Amino acid sequence: MVAKDTDFYTDGVRSGNRRILAKTITLIESAHPAHRQLGRTVVDRLLPDTGKAVRLGITGVPGVGKSTFIESFGMMLVEKGHQVAVLAVDPSSTRSGGSVMADKTRMEKLSVAPGAFIRPSPSGGTLGGVARMTRETLLVCEAAGFDVVIVETVGVGQSETTVASMVDFFLVLMLAGAGDELQGIKKGVLELADGVAINKADGDNIEKAEMARRSYEMALHLLNPATPNWSPPVLTCSALTLAGVDQLWETVQDHRRRLSASGELDQKRSSQALAWMWSRIEDGLKERFFSNPAIKARLRHIEASVRRGELSATIGAETLLFLLDNPG
Ligand code: GDP
């Protein structure tokens, strides 16, 4: 029965059926354990069909122009004949409100383009939960034939690091203006960047954008590049006039060519997969810990004893971990 279900989803996704693709993502995002398990099995079976897309992460503060940029960039790619999927990691989003990212209403043309598929951020609560769903969705989209997968995120907490760890190229959108420059450097987001683009380089803003471009370029020079084969470039673009948008795609492709030639792209992906496994192990252990009935029964009491100094932190931890292996 489950085997038949699995085939239904895997065959549907492989044939590029959008309805079945959406259903598969719903399984991945489901709170129902059996559905989630089925989703995992489907992802696992589809694994041989994954890996062929350009995985592109995009971040920037709210208002920088992410959705406008993705709309323009995505339309350009679709017009070049690419199949583009847009996903989002936004742990603050809920379906009923909040800042739902990669929203269809924010990308009017792309959302109805036959070559594009847009999926808003799952309302998973924790970053770990949202990241799991997005990463699995990315794989499923690849299996469905999308050759460019864009993962959008806003700079909340660790979400930028999380997205950078699931993509090949991480693009940071910035605005001209002293405040942003410092902000970017402080948050360490530039260290994650494979490329930086100063958006809204249009009209009266062109000169300021060029100035910002130069100061970011200097800031990036001070950072050691992650690889001798790639120094993250700083460009300017306008999501409205499309100036520079084509060059950004050229940059992504250039990065890909160089890192493929040196073998670094494969290395990057395998270390990402390994890091992903470890983060799943950590999540799984935590889940098991907190759902263990014996631990649940004693957790509060032990916490209180440690807080009052009646029990050492080490003994408290050991007692709880002992319960994980010896529930009786
Ligand atoms: P997001 O919050 O990062 O997704 O930003 P949006 O895409 O919603 O854009 C925020 C505002 O900036 C909107 O009013 C856009 O029309 C405007 N905007 C976005 N890109 C550009 C651009 O390249 N040039 C100009 N002048 N405005 C832009």
Image (cartoon, rainbow, N blue to C red):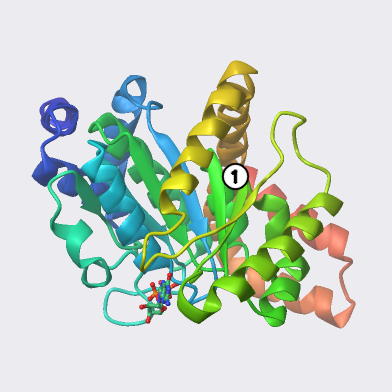
**Residue drawn at (12%, 47%), measured in percent from left and top?**
114
Q: How many numbered circles does the render carry? A: 1
> Which corner quadrant of the image does residue 224 belong to?
top right
Q: Nearer the viewer, residue 263 or 199?
A: 199
Residue placed at 54% from the left, 77% from the top? 205
Q: Nearer the viewer, residue 7 or 97?
A: 97
The residue under label 1 is 279
Question: Would you say the beta carbon of the disc 1 residue lies within 8 angstroms of ligand 1?
Answer: no
* Local SS, label 1: helix
User: Position of 326 compared to 28: left or right?
Assistant: right
Task: Say if 235 sits above or below 185 in the image.
Answer: above
Q: Position of residue 203 (x, y in %)?
A: 46, 77
Residue 108, visible in the rendered structure: yes
- Across and down, in percent, residue 274 comes to 60, 31
Q: Residue at x 82, y 79 (%)?
A: 307
Left or right of 57: which side holds 100? left
Q: Quadrant of the N terminus?
A: top left
Residue 327 makes an appearance in the image: no
Residue shown at the point (18%, 43%) measured from the top left: 115
* Quadrant in the picture for residue 34: top left
Report x, y in % for residue 151. Answer: 42, 52
Q: Mark 1 Cα within 10 Å, few/some/many (few <14, many 20+)?
A: some
Vertical comparison of 209 with 218: above or below = below
270 to 241, vertically: above or below: above
Looking at this view, is 44 or 109 the one in front?
Answer: 109
Residue 305, given in percent of the width and then of the height, sits at 80, 76
Amino acid of disc 1: Ser
Q: Is residue 328 left or right of residue 133?
A: right
Q: Quadrant of ligand 1?
A: bottom left
